[in-house]
Image (tube, rainbow, N blue to C red):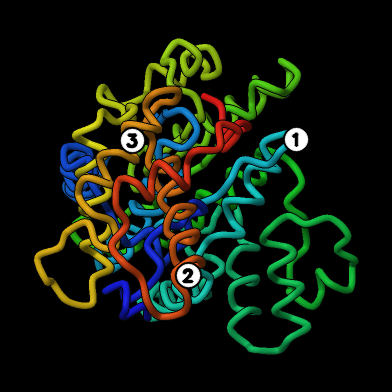
Amino acid sequence: MYEYLNLKAWPFQTVPDDDFAQIWAGRQQTKKELEHLIWRMQFAPKSNLHLVWANLGMGKTHTLLHIQHLCKHTKGKLVPAYAVMPNNPGNFLDIYRVIVSNLPFDYLGDQLVKVGNDSSGSVALHPLFSKSPGVVNALLAMRTGDLERVIAAQQWLRAQPGLTAKDLRTVSVTYRIKTTEDAISALTALIKLITYKVMPVGKLVIMLDEYQRIGELKQSVRVSINAGIHTLYNANPTGLEILLSFSFGNQDNVAYLVSNELKSRAELQSIKLDVLNEDEAIEFLRDLLAQFRVKDDGRWAFPFSPEAVKELITRISRDKTLTPRRLMLYANHVLLEKVSSSGPNQIDEIGVLDIKEILSDTKLGILDLD
């Protein structure tokens, strides 16, 4: 806690994580859109595909992690799986691996118990798993708590290479997940398990970040991965939400990288994060600081003065666009420099002259380009 700053935690974090993702600052219209999106996902069982795009620093990854946070508060109706597109995937199987690695295995095990309680025969013979019966045995092996079986089961379910015949026997499975068809069958079984008897609507929400990396691949690989996602979507007309995010703001680039089949299935309204104007930048910093206050003493900008905040934003906007990441990067630098010069556990309010002095070096941020 930074009581002398009237802050319960450090407010400037440019690399998002699960805890910081609970915070939403500024962009009230976008916040309303996200809340409406969560409502829509829970209202109708139909599967949906969403496109998210923004330039670097606009808060795209934070937005996805915030959606994940909102999903976790739907009492199991929406089960989120946030994953990052691999740097150089060779096929859809690599996409499958990062998705499954981020599934909640404990929840899947609990759902499997629910299926078992409703079944008179073997759970592995339940129609949910007709195309991928190995999923049942893998999840059952994880629930034993036996370390060797748990590790082997996770490796099998994640389609990791190197599984031996002994490993397969340990998990009681007779085949490996090694093709796109195998991966889609296994993931479909997992989706059906996640949504089993979740009322009125249950869904798996797959968020695949940095999907623009598909543009760096050979055309044949790009086509194969897009086709895999398309096939997965078609195999699950209900119970699935897919969000593909892109790190550039031009919608034409998004359209180029996504196949016509996927574009035809994308929701009419996609999520776009635009640059901030100066008023929106002030709102962002105001909201951000407010959520870290120890107490509300009426000084919304402290440890900055309101005039210092405006000066900070003006100086950034002279040469660069205003983005959430950039605002936090510069505010973080100024605050650290001021604390360093003031000494431990004490600080005077940061004023306009402080901003000018600390940011006087013209080489500051020289590598931070739009």
| Residue drawn at point x = 46 percent, y = 57 percent | 13
Q: Position of residue 12 (x, y in %)?
A: 42, 57
* Mark 3 or 2, nearer chain start: 3
| Residue drawn at point x = 67 percent, y = 61 percent | 157
* Callout 2: SS: helix
| Residue drawn at point x = 32 percent, y = 78 percent | 4
Mark 3, residue position:
48
Q: Disc 3 to disc 2, how far (Cα)?
A: 22 Å
Q: Disc 1 to disc 2, how far (Cα)?
A: 29 Å
Q: Nearer the viewer, mark 1 or mark 2?
A: 1
Q: Disc 3 to disc 1, how far (Cα)?
A: 26 Å
**Pick the front one: 253 or 9:** 9
Which quadrant, please, contains the N terminus? bottom left
251 to the left or right of 238? right
| Residue drawn at point x = 48 percent, y = 70 percent | 108
Q: Position of residue 144 (x, y in %)?
A: 63, 88
Task: Give the amino acid type for the residue marked by disc 2 in the picture.
Answer: Leu
Q: Position of residue 205 (x, y in %)?
A: 39, 49
Residue 218 falls in image quadrant: top right
Residue 70 visible in the shown view: no
**Pick the front one: 176 or 41:** 41
Residue 297 falls in image quadrant: bottom left
Task: Give the amino acid type for the residue marked by disc 1 in the picture.
Answer: Asn
Residues marked 3 and 2 touching at CB (< 8 Å): no
Residue 108 is marked as 2
Residue 88 is marked as 1
Within 10 Å of disc 3 (Cα), the crowding (few <14, some 14-19, many 20+) is many
Q: Position of residue 82 (x, y in %)?
A: 49, 52
* Mark 1 or 2, nearer chain start: 1
Residue 146 visible in the shown view: yes
Residue 149 falls in image quadrant: bottom right
48 to the left or right of 133? left
